[in-house]
Image (cartoon, grey):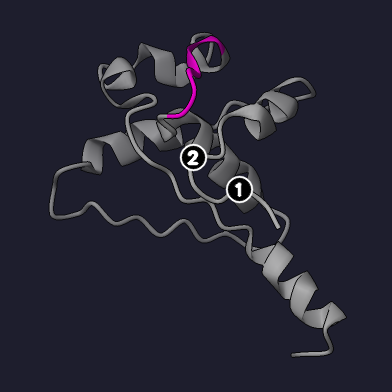
Amino acid sequence: MGTYLNCGNEAFRQICSGIYVDKTNLIRYINSSIGTSANLTCFSRPRRFGKSFAAVMLSAYYDKSCDSGELFDSLAISRADSYEKYRNQFNVIYLDITWFISRAKTKGHR
């Protein structure tokens, strides 16, 4: 199965070890909505446009079970006022929906 609560930053570390385009300004946007009436964010994109990578990035940034400073210190989010305030401060629940879909297909469900 897998770890769903506080899954750490290893997946984002693997992404950053290859060719990585910095999308951390998404974190700046989400940080600006924390504690406001607009605190729910829907991140929808077409297929193959990086939704899973974004989810892994967000998990690594907010997850309190690890220290992600070294991963984010050189990225755009590190220049935001809210960078230190929210980094690694929350319990994160990460659900890989593609895992659930593939599991249902192997069991013969649709």
Residue 109 shown left or right of residue 30 in the figure: right
Element under label 2?
A: loop
Residue at left offset 71%, top offset 64%? 98
- Image quarter of residue 110: bottom right
Q: Tell me the kind of residue under disc 2.
A: Asn
The answer to which of 48 and 104 lies nearer the viewer is 104
Q: Position of residue 9 (x, y in %)?
A: 59, 29
Does the residue at mark 1 contact the one at mark 2 (Cβ under 8 Å)?
A: yes
Question: How far apart in space, not on screen, are marks 1 and 2 (Cα)?
Answer: 8 Å
Magenta range = 65-70
* Image disc number at residue 110: none
Q: Quadrant of the N terminus?
A: bottom right
- Residue 74, percent across and down? 53, 9
Residue ID at (43%, 37%): 26
Magenta segment includes 68:
yes
Question: Residue 72's spot in the image, x, y percent?
Answer: 51, 17
Decide: is 48 above or below 105.
Answer: above
Residue 55 is left or right of residue 47, and the answer is left
Displayed quadrant of residue 99: bottom right
11 or 76: nearer the eye?
11
The correct choice, above or below, for 63 with respect to 33 in the image is above
What amino acid is found at the position of numbered circle 1 in the picture?
Answer: Thr
The residue that mark 1 highlights is 3
For the point 49% across and 47% down, the residue is 5
Residue 32 forms part of the magenta stretch: no
Is 44 or 108 nearer to us in this picture?
108
Q: Residues within 10 Å of mark 1 (few under 14, many from 20)?
A: few
Name the residue that disc number 2 marks.
6
Q: Is residue 43 left or right of residue 110?
A: left
